[in-house]
């Protein structure tokens, strides 16, 4: 049975090491995650675990007093298509709405189509597209948090 936990700030070391391992498996830049997570304001880390193994996570941080950024999220290959990413997303939206944020922002790439579709299903709108410093097309999405997000 998958269990969900959240941490405002850095999680305990064993959990964080599990997040880094999964992050490296999916994104290949765990050092970037480690460095930036320690300096972003009001970081929220959500973790899905099976027994003691991290099988999914979702991380975000404050951009302004009313705007929150949903930064990274991943689910281990063998645990995909079980609703874990959706559950992590719902919990993130609920917790940041309860904390008083009214706008949630995220960015994605066209190659992450499952994430793009999940964001749309969970109420995000595409608000812009741009080419980043590496020449990669990116999609900016926003969601206005409303009362039903905190139920």
Image: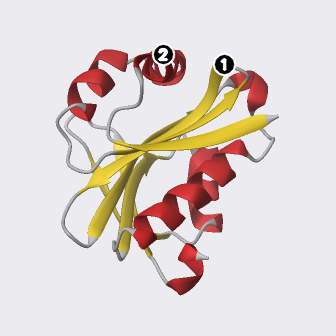
According to the image, label 2 marks what residue? 14
- Mark 1 lies on a secondary structure that is loop
Q: Left of 48 or right of it: where is 106?
A: left
Q: Left of 17 or right of it: where is 128?
A: left
Say how the picture is coloured: secondary structure
Residue 120 location (% of width, % of height):
59, 65
Above-or-below relation of 97 to 75: below
Residue at point 65%, 19% (across, down): 53
Residue 100 location (% of width, % of height):
34, 74
Q: Left of 54 or right of it: where is 23?
A: left
Quick check: can you spot residue 68? yes
Residue 127 location (% of width, % of height):
37, 71
Please report whichever mark, 1 or 2, sits nearer to the chain's N-terminal start: 2
Local packing at callout 1 (Cα closer than 10 Å; few below 14, some 14-19, many 20+) is few
Residue 56 location (% of width, % of height):
61, 33
According to the image, label 1 marks what residue? 52
Q: Which mark is residue 149?
A: none
- Quadrant position of residue 50: top right
Above-or-below relation of 115 to 143: above
């Amino acid at each position: 049975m998958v269990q969900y936990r959240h941490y405002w700030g850095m999680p305990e070391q064993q959990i964080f090491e599990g997040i880094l391992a999964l992050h490296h498996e999916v994104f290949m830049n765990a050092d970037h995650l480690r460095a930036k997570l320690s300096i972003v304001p009001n970081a929220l880390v959500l973790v899905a675990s099976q027994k003691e193994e991290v099988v999914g996570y979702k991380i975000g941080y404050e951009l302004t007093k009313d705007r929150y950024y949903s930064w990274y999220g991943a689910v281990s290959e063998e645990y995909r298509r079980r609703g874990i990413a959706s559950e992590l997303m719902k919990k993130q939206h609920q917790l940041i709405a309860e904390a008083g944020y009214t706008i949630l922002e995220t960015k994605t790439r066209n190659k992450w189509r499952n994430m793009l579709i999940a964001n749309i299903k969970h109420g995000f709108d595409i608000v812009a597209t741009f080419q980043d410093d590496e020449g990669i097309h990116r999609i900016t999405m926003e969601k206005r948090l409303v009362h039903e997000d905190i139920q």
